């Protein structure tokens, strides 16, 4: 049996999509990050980084959303592009572009525009620019391809599907998706899939804390309350 | 023939270490990011993200340092940990922990402490805290293991080797490594390897621009000069 440690954030959603698309049986365990579940010794033994998602696949622990996507794709043989060296190179390059670029820069854009203790002009500008630049690269690629790697739906598309709905929030513009029409088309195609709807519905079965109060801030952004560094 | 597009930054260094350790023949092509080489149409055709490292392996293009490490390890069968599901899970989890956590947060810590147009207290604190937290997880893991995945030297260690020397610079403390004694021990072990010395010496064969003047800032941090977002 596979256990899926999750919450409603973009990174767990990607894994939820894979589990539903692949038809894998799983037990979902909510980790309420606004209540600090991610810092419990039990969860730290699973992911020392204290973040969701993580999975326990019959005793095999995997953490980090993109690691889980690649692990499950390799294990099941599903949602990969092909076995040639060039196909493997393309999959790894774009998956890592999302892991090291799209995700982190999108996350920083969300943080400084919406959650930092002050609205600071330069960090907002830096991450607005970098998030936009990364999504522009994705959109340009999708102008010539149905999916990120061509005609085949892969884990790279799943990784994008988790984050793209946050674009309006990270850029502070409810109409932001009009600037990324090719990405918007892919999102509509994926959203229409039953697996996507099932992945989105998963969080509604659990009562996650919703208030972004001081308790939530202390658990999610402990650096805000840390002493000043030297 | 393999072409290695590189500069002296942490991410290309990791790939240089692999190439030297594996004894692969390669042609090094310097990309002077302070002069804007990364923005040329020719290089953008290789990596649309405009970053080094990238490789052209006999026509197979791979970009992102961790994608290249995994691609080369899989292709050569070298510097991996093993074939079991649990070994694969461990490799992917820790490689992605570096790709999505150690690297991006270390990079932001370097930027806000050293290169941002103003010294802003909150971003410096946020990234100091997060960089330290990530390196603490690495150091704790190395307290009980010779290498990141146990007794075997893998691409995960190479990925760490690229970034760890920047810890004093990113934390603004020349003695910062005393806080990470296990990591310091691994770095000393890796630095003593001929391949590490060869990887470090590569940059000295080329005349990279060293001045961090306005030209360099415009090429490396274009968001500083961008208009304010809405």
Image: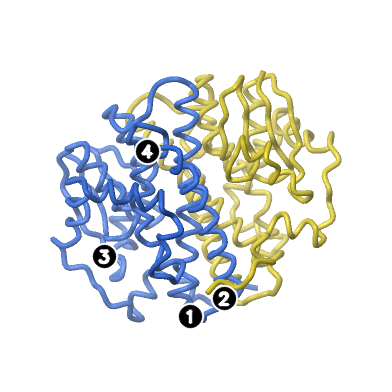
Chain colours: A yellow, B blue
- Mark toward the start of the polypeptide (1 vs 4): 1
Tags 2 and 1 on a common chain: no
Tags 2 and 3 on a common chain: no
Q: Label 4's element?
A: loop
Graded by Cα atoms within 10 Å as few (under 14), some (14 to 19) or many (20 or more), the crowding at tag 2 reads some
- Mark toward the start of the polypeptide (3 vs 4): 3
User: In the picture, which quadrant includes the N terminus of chain A?
Assistant: top right
Q: Nearer the viewer, residue A59 or B110?
A: A59
Which chain letter goes with mark 1?
Answer: B
Tags 1 and 4 on a common chain: yes
> Do labels 2 and 1 touch, CB within 8 Å?
yes
Closer to the observer: label 1 or label 4?
4
Badge number at residue B215? none
Q: Label 3's element?
A: loop
- State the CA–CA distance, disc 2 to disc 1: 8 Å
Badge number at residue B146? 4
Q: Which residue is mark 1?
A: B117
Q: Which residue is found at the position 45% from the left and 26% from the top?
A: B87
Number of callouts:
4
Q: Quadrant of residue B129?
A: bottom right
> Do labels 1 and 4 touch, CB within 8 Å?
no
Residue A167 in the image, given as x and y percentages of width and height: 65, 55
In the rendered image, the vertical position of residue A33 relative to residue A16, given as above or below: below
- State the CA–CA distance, disc 3 to disc 4: 36 Å
Horizontally, is A12 left or right of B47 in the view? right
Badge number at residue B32? 3
Q: Which residue is mark 2?
A: A122
Horizontally, is B32 left or right of A156 in the view? left
């Amino acid at each position: 049996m596979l256990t899926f440690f999750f919450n409603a954030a973009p990174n767990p959603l990607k894994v939820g999509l894979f589990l539903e698309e692949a038809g894998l049986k799983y037990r979902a365990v909510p980790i309420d990050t606004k209540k600090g579940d991610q810092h419990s010794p039990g969860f730290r033994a699973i992911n020392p980084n204290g973040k969701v998602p993580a999975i326990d696949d019959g005793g095999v622990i995997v953490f980090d959303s993109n690691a889980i996507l690649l692990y499950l794709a390799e294990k099941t043989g599903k949602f990969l592009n092909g076995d040639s060296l060039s196909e493997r190179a393309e999959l790894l390059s774009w998956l890592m572009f999302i892991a090291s670029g799209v995700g982190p820069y999108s996350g920083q854009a969300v943080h400084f525009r919406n959650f930092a203790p002050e609205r600071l002009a330069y960090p907002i500008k830096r991450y607005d620019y970098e998030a936009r630049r990364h999504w522009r690269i994705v959109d340009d690629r999708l102008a010539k391809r149905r999916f990120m790697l061509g005609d085949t739906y892969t884990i790279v598309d799943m990784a994008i599907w988790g984050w793209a709905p946050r674009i309006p929030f990270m850029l502070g513009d409810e109409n932001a998706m009009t600037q990324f029409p090719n990405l918007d088309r892919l999102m509509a195609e994926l959203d229409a899939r039953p697996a996507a709807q099932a992945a989105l519905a998963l969080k509604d079965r659990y009562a996650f804390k919703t208030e972004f109060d001081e308790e939530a801030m202390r658990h999610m952004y402990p650096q805000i309350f840390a002493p000043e560094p030297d």
